[in-house]
Amino acid sequence: MTPHEYAAYSAVELAALVRARQVTPEEVLNCALRRARDLDPTLNAIAHWLDDDARSSLPHVPLDAPFAGVPFLVKDTGAGVRGAPMTSGSRLMAGFCSPADTTLVSRYRAAGLMIFGKTNTPEFGLSFTTEPLAQGATRNPWNLSYSPGGSSGGSAAAVAAGIVPVAHGSDGAGSIRLPASHCHLFGYKPSRGLMPFGPVQGEGLAGVSGVHALSRTVLDSACLLDVSCGAEIGDPYASPLMNGSFATASQRDPEKPLRIGFSVRTPFNDAVDPACERAVMDAARLCEDLGHHVEEASFSGDAQAIKDSWLVIVSTAALHSIRRREAQLGVVPGSRLEPVNAAWMAWASTLSARDFYAAFDIARITGRQLGQTFTRYDVLLTPTAATPPPPLGELACIDNDCMAFYDRFWGHGPFTGLYNLTGCPAMSVPFHIASDNRPVGVHFGAALGADMTLMALAGQLERSRPWHYRCYGMENAA
């Protein structure tokens, strides 16, 4: 197998070759490492290399596992790998290494995945572009002048360039789905409580964050969900039980025609980029052609309250982790943060417990409102982002105006955070390539626990209009 041949396979296909003993895990890992070494100097997708760890794991790869011998990358925040750096894109975390695998990483290893690196992320994952001062900017393989998105931008760039077929990501406001949209990938955020955060952390960002992956195929995402999902002992709550496997769901059409409501306006009733609007209208027509009932719809929640409550909840959760690390090191608060985040945490330190509770209450009210919407519709369709991938620098902020930054942040991704606040599942599906080689995805969300519905719809869309073969964005990728 050559690195170029390797890049054409999905994770499921690579594992099948390993199980059939047609290739060895070592051969596959060598291809991934060769491709990574060739492409990463341009992309800067990988923040920390763990190839020695991956090679030492070769004798222990379970050869009959679902992902036997498949090379894998883990985002540098949201999942700990024993002995590996966990810098979260910040100078504040320099020198910190995870003492043990998190539950999710343990499940990945048991499934046969070989982890050979950790991917780049903005500082503490608090941006929709991956341009941390500590580790440098990641570039979009489809157009190197543009951002791959954030905060799972390193993972997105690595998958889009064929370094790995699937990679871990985390999603606190759209951080899996926005990069998936910007890199022509499938990105899935599961229902709250479906994925483990332990053994130390009970939940991510007070329940706002979710974890899963970015992939080139729906089946890879579904199979990875099958081997990694499920509550663990001591979880504060769990997602409703799923009947059957996600892989099976992704390979069959939805059991009945779906009621799909679509909108091309933001929750603030603003217009989106014409390319994003065209993608949604195209997706709506395809869904209608597939037999679903499609009509224009809107969500009646308070857009400003949703935006404000997300800011308070996430700011408070981030402040807790950041101040704890600063206390451990004995450094002045904010002194090792990027200017915008130092200002953001200074603002967060003025919030009270009452502020947090009020924001949390808005999140729960919003969840009930969205739940009522899902009594009328099975699925809601919108753009994933308000624009195609932004130029590098457009969403970065190196000054201390955190509220101006937050307005740009939310303005770029006004659709996705709703599903983080409410815990509902959502996905970004590749659908359009703009004339300047910038991908545009469309966003589908469903009711809490309706993950099987989304996976079935995703598989149906992929079979109707395949996209995975178009995902090697760099002309010189080989």
Image (tube, rainbow, N blue to C red):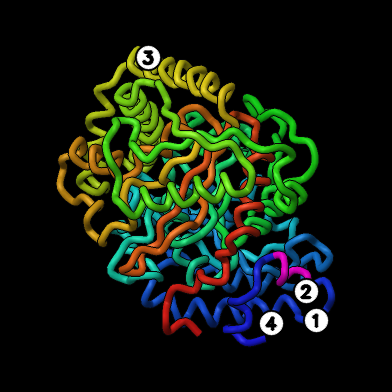
Where's residue 227, x and y in %?
73, 50
Q: Are marks 4 and 3 in contact (CB under 8 Å)?
A: no
Which circle's residue, 1 or 3, is located before the other in the chain? 1
Residue 27, labelled with which disc?
A: 4
The amino acid marked with disc number 1 is: Gln
7 relative to 273, above or below: below
Residue 358, labelled with which disc?
A: 3
Mark 2 nearby-residue class (10 Å; few <14, some 14–19, many ≥20): many
Q: Are marks 2 and 1 in contact (CB under 8 Å)?
A: yes
Residue indicated by mark 2: 18
Front residue of this view, candidates 45 and 385? 385
Q: Nearer the viewer, mark 1 or mark 4?
A: 1
What is the count of numbered marks? 4
Distance, label 1 to label 3, CA atoms, is 58 Å
Which circle's residue, 4 or 2, is located before the other in the chain? 2
Which circle's residue, 2 or 3, is located before the other in the chain? 2
Any part of residue 161 in sight: yes
Q: Are marks 4 and 2 in contact (CB under 8 Å)?
A: no
Disc 1 secondary structure class: loop
Where's residue 121, x and y in %?
40, 55
The residue depicted at 53 percent of the width and 52 percent of the height is: 187
Q: In the image, which residues are magenta? A: 12-16
Which circle's residue, 4 or 3, is located before the other in the chain? 4
Classify residue 252 as left or right of residue 2. right
Residue indicated by mark 1: 22
The amino acid marked with disc number 2 is: Val
